[in-house]
Amino acid sequence: EGKVSASFGEGDPSEASAAPPGTTGPELSLQEALGTRAFWLLFFLYGLCIIVLGMIMIHIVPHLTDTGMSATAAANVLGAIGLGSILGRILVGVLSDRYGTKLVLAACLIIKAVVLLCLPRTGGFLASYALGFLYGVSYGGFMVVIPALTSYLFGLSAMGAIFATISIAEGVGFGLGSYLAGYIWDMSGSYRMMFLIGIGLIVVSMLLAVFLKAPAMERG
């Protein structure tokens, strides 16, 4: 008892997340990590969520102005996302140490999905501002969880190279998300489909997270 499980979804979550990442998983090189299922699950999980981020960060202001909100008010909602992300980074760092990284990741993804579901149905500034802030909390927290998961899954010896490779999904995903949302608006004159696709991508990310295990447990 008290032994940290090799799968971060099992055992005492506070022990698993508080333990040094290098002691809870194998120490893999970049080449070794690329050959694991865990790497590609994390890569695509990250990329899908960043596609959604690109949609929201680039198109939230046009969406809100389309609903009749002033450009200044819409820009303030975008600012709320940035403000919330500060709190999210701090809060999720603390919570993941206490409750476990995978549980906190699930919470971030659920919050994202809820915000995407509610935002198209919200017309007022205060409600939009609150949703933007909440999205920012989940976004900021998510950005903290991914490097923590990287070090947990693959160890610290090549963490920089491994996380840099995973981060390729960030650049590709953000560009794809912003383009896709713009294309949707050009084709339909509405952002409603953008939100539906965003929810779908978050749901897929949740499914990927379910199967995310340390490489030592992949054949278990």
Image (cartoon, rainbow, N blue to C red):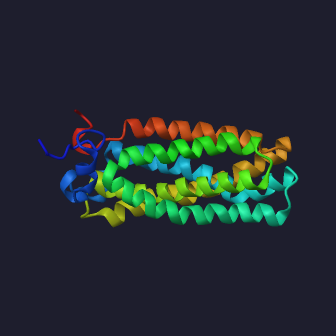
| Residue 135: percent from left, percent from top | 60, 53
At a point 48% along the width and 50% down the height, the residue shown is 46
- Residue at 85% x, 49% y is 67
Quarter of the image holding residue 121?
top right
Residue 35 placement (x, y as % from top left): 31, 47
For the residue pair 178 and 15, the one nearer the viewer reads as: 15
Position in image of residue 181 (x %, y %): 73, 49
> Where is residue 129, by image quadrant?
bottom right
Is residue 200 depicted above or below 186 in this figure?
above
Image location of residue 97, percent across then percent down: 32, 56
Q: In which quarter of the image is the C terminus?
A: top left
The quarter of the rendered structure image containing the N terminus is top left
* Residue lying farthest to the right in this orientation: 68
Relative to residue 74, is residue 170 drawn left or right?
A: left
| Total numbered badges shown on the rendered structure | 0
Q: Identify the residue at horizontal 25%, vertical 56% (top origin).
A: 18
Residue furthest out toward the top: 220
The answer to whether residue 195 is left or right of residue 50 is right
Compare residues 50 and 17 and report the one nearer the observer. 17
Using the image, determine if residue 94 lies above or below residue 185: below
Q: Which residue is drawn at 24% across and 34% down?
A: 219
Apparent side of residue 47 relative to residue 19 in the rendered image (left or right): right
Q: Residue pushed farthest left?
A: 1
